[in-house]
């Protein structure tokens, strides 16, 4: 029984590979022929208009109408104009290699009104087009190297191949891995023909990998898992597809851009140069704002200061606002979450105006109090403080609301029971409030840290990096490399990749820490 | 909670502290209101946030400014912003709710990977995807179009919605589902008939944030939209207080009109911010 399954599988696999290969080859041939015929026709057209023929043209002439030969009246001869202006008779003693083909093509064109042909044995394409003084004939040859690989077709073939392999996996059988490897490798033949050795080797490696996974039993396990989680996958599919198109593709493109350098729209592959330039500081001292490590330091300080302020102010306010004796606590709550409700770029622009030297509200308050006006963005410390003030103003309500939510979920009888047992207010806070607060605050803290780390708007709109880019954080720095410092897209993409790696690292460490905390 | 109120003195300190904080919170808002309603471009240096004169001059200027072909700019940009934000929200919620439910309730191979991926994608700085998106949208000739902007916003809206909704589904009780499953309901039926209605507050909050994020976004908008007929409101506001000509009165009026819709939404839905609904559902 098992053997029968196996045999029919091999047969099906071989047959589908055969069909796929044939379809692939014929598609490729049709596409190739269509393209080459078009190219030759185009060359003939340009010759008929008296233009210089394009590349890959073997011979191109405007051929005169046929006229009786002077020597033998029954022969009809045609002549062409050489590039130096002399007239030359086709054929005869001084014949050039393609004279016969040109002559025949002109005759065919006169008879049928159209002529275009691919001579398969010599890979020449001959096309004729009408010209004012006769017929324009062009003989072209396909340019060296294969035409671009048709990715869609290959993708289709791969899907087909994987379907065959999946069918085999579900069927089961002893020597299956070998069949899988051979079946999938069959695709390597057309790949080799049109796309070279490297692609074919990749394909063979892939099929070997699949076969190896099958031999290890991983495929069957995956299949079982897939069937078991079938409903979950059905729920996930629409989102996964959208993410793949909207995020996956740009992400991969972005990763790739980091290895290129953009010079006025011309991309050149530079390998790891961008990353080396960033991570080595590009020869700048550590105190130079353009040094990556300086910017990273600023970013870390920025994130830490803000998160500490957000959480401490937010939690403190939440602890106050939940007190039942506080009159108007709902009113206070409404007013205090106001900064969250205002779009943050508007907040940033408002604060930028408030920190303005001459007419800004902050300096007005200072001078009313009899203090000197401060030029906020001329010094690093005051500039950084302006950013922090803005971001604290707009960021604490989130933490406050999260903390309030967590506090309201604490059952009040817990406090009552603790009070009956004689627990002091501090003990109640330590053993009831804090443990209930933590599960809500930790994710909020992680989220807040990431938001702050990437808080483009405040930095960009309030201090705008002043003084001299010193208050820029990583995301604004990457943006400036792309759009304000000579369109260095490659460098900016490398920057973005590094930021992403930092965030990934951070998340992994963070989740380890919280897990340890929970245990 | 603490049924006995503390001493009047400490109560007084608490009132004082919270009132001062409230003043700090309100002050910038008052400054903007003053700038919006005070006529002219007088750079008032007084500290008081109360306007000395009242006029709607800046609002009139803002609403009546038009481009060369006679389009009213502010209304046009408001329409653009609304379209983009609404479309982003709908796309985000629609695509996210099923995935969030699956990640919350089912245990399957690749679940942890899925969760990690959505979290990671949500952390992407916009600039990481900005250039590749620019290149791709250029290829698809979707630059300078609102559809292109919706697609760009969806890259952050979908993972955000998945992540937030998953959190919300996690907080919903499993009892209702288990009861429905015992009654023979299919997974899809449970999802549509029980979980989605239960998750309405979560959907509302998530949708609100998604809408606000799209409405409030300006870097991507100002990078991708180069034609001033396709601008959204943030691009207009940013340009009104540019480096060389800052018209704070106009900006203030625009800021108020732009913020009001999202602020109203925010206050209308903010009671859902604290998910107190779960407890009620199990008890009832």
Image: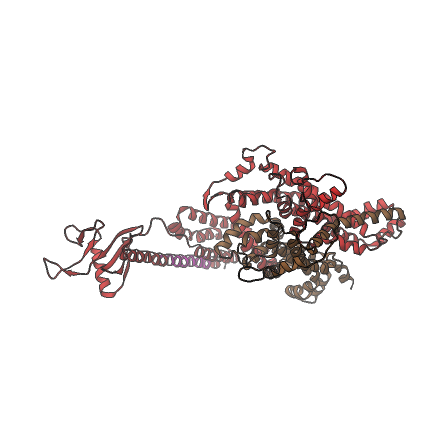
Chain colours: A red, B brown
Q: Is residue A371 magenta?
A: no
Q: Is residue A499 left or right of residue A199?
A: right
Q: Is residue A474 left or right of residue B270?
A: left
Q: Is residue A40 left or right of residue A87?
A: right
Q: Determine if residue B198 is in view.
A: yes
Q: State the count of labels.
A: 0
Q: Position of residue A312 (x, y in %)?
A: 75, 45
Nearer-the-camera pick, B162 or B220: B220
Q: Position of residue A383 (x, y in %)?
A: 66, 40
Q: Quadrant of residue A282?
A: top right
Name the dominant secondary structure of the magenta segment: helix
Q: Quadrant of residue B202?
A: bottom right
Query: In the orientation shown, which residue stands out farthest toward the left?
Result: A71
Nearer-the-camera pick, A209 or B175: B175
Q: Determine if residue A519 is in view.
A: no
Provide the residue span drawn in magenta. Answer: A6-29
Nearer-the-camera pick, A355 or A420: A355
Residue occupying the point 46% across, 51% down: A181
Nearer-the-camera pick, A403 or B118: A403
């Amino acid at each position: 029984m098992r053997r029968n399954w196996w045999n029919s599988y091999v047969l099906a696999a071989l047959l589908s590979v055969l069909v796929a290969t044939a379809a692939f080859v014929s598609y490729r041939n049709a596409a190739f022929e269509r393209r080459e015929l078009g190219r030759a026709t185009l060359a003939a057209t340009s010759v008929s208009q008296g233009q210089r023929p394009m590349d890959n043209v073997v011979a191109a002439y405007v051929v005169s109408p046929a006229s009786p030969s002077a020597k033998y009246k029954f022969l009809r001869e045609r002549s062409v104009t050489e590039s130096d202006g002399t007239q030359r008779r086709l054929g005869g003693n001084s014949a050039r290699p393609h004279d016969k083909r040109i002559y025949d093509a002109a005759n065919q064109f006169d008879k049928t009104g159209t002529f275009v042909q691919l001579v398969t044995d010599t890979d020449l394409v001959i096309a004729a087009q009408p010209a004012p003084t006769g017929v324009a004939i062009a003989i072209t040859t396909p340019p060296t190297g294969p035409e671009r690989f048709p990715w869609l077709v290959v993708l289709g073939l791969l899907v087909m191949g994987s379907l065959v392999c999946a069918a085999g996996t579900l069927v089961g059988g002893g020597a299956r891995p070998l069949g899988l490897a051979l079946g999938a490798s069959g695709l390597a033949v057309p790949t080799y023909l049109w796309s070279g050795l490297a692609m074919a080797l990749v394909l063979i490696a892939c099929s070997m990998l699949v076969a190896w996974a099958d031999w290890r039993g991983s495929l069957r396990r995956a299949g079982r898992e897939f069937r078991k989680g079938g409903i979950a996958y059905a729920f996930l599919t629409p989102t996964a597809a959208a993410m793949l198109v909207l995020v996956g593709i740009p992400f991969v493109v972005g990763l790739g851009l980091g290895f290129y350098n953009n010079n006025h729209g011309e991309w050149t592959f530079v390998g790891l140069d961008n990353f080396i330039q960033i991570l080595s500081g590009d020869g700048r001292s550590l105190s130079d704002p353009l040094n990556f490590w300086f910017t990273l330091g600023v970013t870390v300080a920025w994130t830490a200061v803000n998160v500490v302020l957000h959480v401490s102010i937010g939690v403190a306010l939440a602890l106050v606002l939940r007190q039942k004796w506080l009159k108007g606590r709902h009113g206070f709550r409404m007013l205090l979450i106001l900064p969250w409700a205002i779009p943050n770029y508007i907040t940033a622009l408002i604060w930028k105006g408030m920190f303005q030297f001459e007419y800004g509200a902050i300096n007005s308050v200072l001078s009313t109090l009899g203090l000197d006006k401060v030029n906020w963005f001329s010094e690093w410390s005051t500039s950084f403080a302006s950013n922090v003030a803005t971001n604290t103003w707009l960021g604490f309500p989130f933490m406050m609301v999260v903390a309030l939510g967590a506090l309201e979920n604490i059952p009040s009888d817990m406090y009552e029971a603790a009070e009956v047992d004689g627990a002091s207010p501090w003990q109640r806070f330590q053993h009831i409030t804090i443990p209930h607060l933590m599960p809500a605050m930790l994710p909020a803290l992680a989220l807040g840290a990431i938001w702050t780390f990437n808080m483009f708007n405040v930095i960009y709109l309030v201090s705008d990096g002043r003084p001299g880019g010193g208050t820029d954080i990583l995301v604004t720095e990457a943006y400036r490399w792309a759009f304000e410092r000579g369109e260095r897209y490659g460098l900016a993409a490398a920057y973005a990749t590094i930021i992403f790696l930092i965030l990934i690292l951070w998340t992994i460490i963070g989740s380890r820490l919280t897990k340890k905390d929970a245990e | 909670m603490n049924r006995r109120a503390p001493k009047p003195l400490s109560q007084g300190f608490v009132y004082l502290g919270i009132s001062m904080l409230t003043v700090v919170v309100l002050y910038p808002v008052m400054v903007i209101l003053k700038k919006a309603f005070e006529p002219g471009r007088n750079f008032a240096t007084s500290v008081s946030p109360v306007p000395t004169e009242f006029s709607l001059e800046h609002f009139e200027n803002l609403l009546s400014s038009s481009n060369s072909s006679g389009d009213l700019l502010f209304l046009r940009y408001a329409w653009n912003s609304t379209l983009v934000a609404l479309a982003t929200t709908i796309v985000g919620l629609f695509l996210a709710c099923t995935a969030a439910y699956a990640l919350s309730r089912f245990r399957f191979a690749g679940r942890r990977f899925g969760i990690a991926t959505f979290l990671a994608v949500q952390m992407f700085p916009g600039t990481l995807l900005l250039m590749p998106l620019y290149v791709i949208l250029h290829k698809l000739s979707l630059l300078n179009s609102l559809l292109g902007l919706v697609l760009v916003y969806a890259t952050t809206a979908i993972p955000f919605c998945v992540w937030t909704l998953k959190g919300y589904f996690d907080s919903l009780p499993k009892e209702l589902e288990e009861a429905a499953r015992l009654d023979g309901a299919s997974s899809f039926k449970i999802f549509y008939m029980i979980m989605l209605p239960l998750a309405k507050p979560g959907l509302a909050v998530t949708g609100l944030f998604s809408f606000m994020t799209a409405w409030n976004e300006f870097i991507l908008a100002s990078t991708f939209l180069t034609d001033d007929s396709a601008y959204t409101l943030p691009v207009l506001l940013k340009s009104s207080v540019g480096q060389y000509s800052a018209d704070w009165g106009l900006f203030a009026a625009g800021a108020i009109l732009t913020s009001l819709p999202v602020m109203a939404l925010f206050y209308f839905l903010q009671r859902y911010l604290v998910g107190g609904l779960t407890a009620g559902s199990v008890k009832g």
